[in-house]
Amino acid sequence: MTIQRLGLNRFALSLGAVGAVVVAFSLIVVKNAPGDTSKELVNVSYDPTRELYQRLNPLFVASYEKATGQHLAIVQSHGGSSWQARKIISGEQQADVVTLGLFTDIDSLRKRGLIAAGWADRLPNHSLPYTSTIVFVVRKDNPRGIKDWPDLLTPGVEIVTPNPRTSGNGKLAALAAWAAVVTRGGTDTEARAYLASLYRHVSDMDEGARGAAIRFALQEIGDVHLTWENEAIREVAESNGKLEIVYPPVSILAEPYVAWVDSTVARDGNLAPAKAYLNFLFTDAAQAAIAHLGYRPYKSGIWTFPSLTLVPITAIARDWDGANEKFFAENGVIDSILGSQPK
């Protein structure tokens, strides 16, 4: 069994690979011997999970073949979380399973009749195999002295963060910034003013997290990168000492959900392997790999992560749907701040 990589931007290459090319998605296919009758599953995921599923997919394929005798090929697609959901809805992207960055991205598929109602209750831990948060990546020795959210507004500081209209990372960074104000005594008016000021420190915004990572780490643009914790860990590990992680005292509790796409698996007869694939994410073997790659596994005691106050979405909105309406819907907070910038 071999692994064949398709696509141009597998950013697991070292930071010395300055010639890396950014594309909207990459495909990682687990192939079997010629002449077999493999079934294929398509996992549509968000931007920084390439390395995660490169680690997990072969483990699952081997365990599933041992248990069932059936060969599987897993095709992996990556991009900005909200953009990925839109592509599935439009029919541009097929998906058997989705492992996206936000509840609302998966639930948008339910609203279009592609995923069944009650989907989050079909898997362990409310369909959350891991959580994460938004942290800061800075240059060596932190020359700008960035330690907390107010420091991002220091004159001259250039921030790198992806577009909150297309990226789960971008949405979560906005929510984390808002939460850092209102959970420490600030009003919504003050939080809106802070967020508007923050975006004045951002120049171009990439569609997804990996494009922003390349901009900051490879192209060396900006003073601070607001990113997923796992992406920050990878960036720093590959930077040869050029980058550091800063954990702000307060950030958002990020909850990347997973689900199978009922309309697709019913049509293609892939329900059994799709369910097995997602249930595998909650096993001890998968949880250990998840933790090793910088995601916070739902099972306790596997890995120790730095401590900070993680604010649940209910601290700033009634739920994820409420947050989407308040912040990211048409005429919401982000529209009011970013105005007519391209969506």
Image (tube, rainbow, N blue to C red):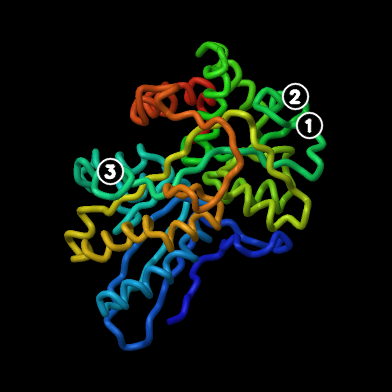
Q: Earlier in the sequence, mark 3 or mark 1?
A: 3
**Does residue 83 show up?**
no
* Pointers 1 and 2 in contact (C-beta within 8 Å): yes
Q: Nearer the viewer, residue 198 or 67?
A: 67
In the foreground, 80 or 295: 295
| Residue occupying image coordinates x 65% and y 36% | 247
Q: Residues within 10 Å of mark 2 (few under 14, many from 20)?
A: few
Task: Say which element carries label 3.
Answer: helix
- Position above or below: 312 against 288: above
Residue hosting label 2 = 154
Type of amino acid at the residue the image marks with label 3: Ala
Residue 208 in percent (x, y) is at: 52, 46
Badge 1 density bin: few <14, some 14–19, many ≥20, Cα 10 Å: few
Inspect the image, locate mark 2, and give the three-letter code of the amino acid beneath it. Answer: Thr
- Residue 125's quadrant in the figure? top left
Residue bearing the label numbered 1:
145
Q: Position of residue 218 (x, y in %)?
A: 71, 53
Query: Mark 1 and mark 2: span between their CA atoms?
Result: 10 Å
**Residue 94 relative to residue 4: left or right:** left
247, above or below 194, in the image: below
Residue 142 in percent (x, y) is at: 78, 38
How far separated are the C-alphas under marks 3 and 1? 41 Å
Q: Which residue does the numbered mark 3 point to in the structure image?
A: 120
Q: Is residue 211 placed above or below 324 in the rendered structure? A: below
Query: Does 250 sit left or right of 270 as displayed?
Result: right
Question: Going 53% across and 19% down the picture, which residue do you hit?
Answer: 183
Looking at numbered disc 1 in the image, what kind of residue is underneath it? Gly
Residue at 38% over, 86% down: 33
